Amino acid sequence: MPRYFPPVPTLSQIQRGTAWVWLVCQSCQHFQPVTLAQFVIRWGPDISSDVLRRSARCHRCGHKGAALQHPSWTGSETGFQTYADAVESVAQLDRLIAKYHDGSRPSGLVRRAPVWDGNRRG
Ligand SMILES: [Zn+2]
């Protein structure tokens, strides 16, 4: 029995449901919110969203290729997460990561073990 794969949506088809999406790196799982309008302006509304999936490059690890993820539902009163909230949540995460590493921006981080204070045992 042949398997049915639905057609890949165009950028404008995705844009009808949301103004932005998460780009998720398939190598290191780094994620970044992006507005769709910039890609519609660059490539046109009828281009396959696969072009974005293939073209996205991770700012953290340099891997090319990403998954698109729809914004999260945050509740019946708030609806879907806004782009501004997503940008702020990434900034908060960056600050948290920087705090527990060497203080540099996460894009410049080298992975290392967390630094423990000297009083801790175990
Ligand atoms: Zn990555």
Image (cartoon, rainbow, N blue to C red):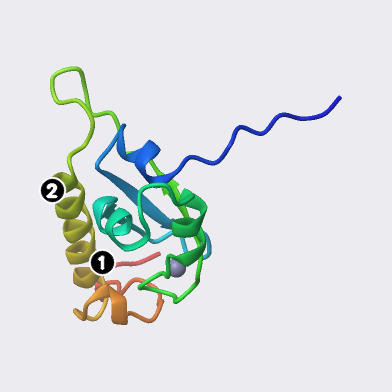
Pointers 2 and 1 in contact (C-beta within 8 Å):
no
Looking at the picture, how far across and down is residue 106, in whole percent?
Answer: 28, 73
The residue lying at 31 percent from left, 32 percent from top is: 17
The residue lying at 20 percent from left, 62 percent from top is: 96
Is 106 placed above or below 95 here?
A: below
Looking at the picture, how far across and down is residue 94, in whole percent?
Answer: 22, 65
* Closest to the observer, 58 or 110: 58
For mark 1, give the secondary structure: helix
Label drawn at residue 84: 2
Q: Looking at the rendering, in which quadrant would you find the N terminus? A: top right
The extreme top residue here reads 76
Dot 2 amino acid type? Ala
Left or right, 103 with respect to 59, comes to left
Is 87 placed above or below 100 here?
A: above
* Closest to the observer, 12 or 73: 12
| N-terminal-most mark, 2 or 1 | 2
Q: Looking at the rendering, in which quadrant would you find the C terminus? A: bottom left
Q: Quadrant of residue 58?
A: bottom left
The residue lying at 35 percent from left, 42 percent from top is: 12
Q: Kindly tell me whether residue 23 is visible in this rendering.
A: yes
Q: Kindly tell me whether residue 25 is visible in this rendering.
A: no
Q: Which residue is mark 1?
A: 97
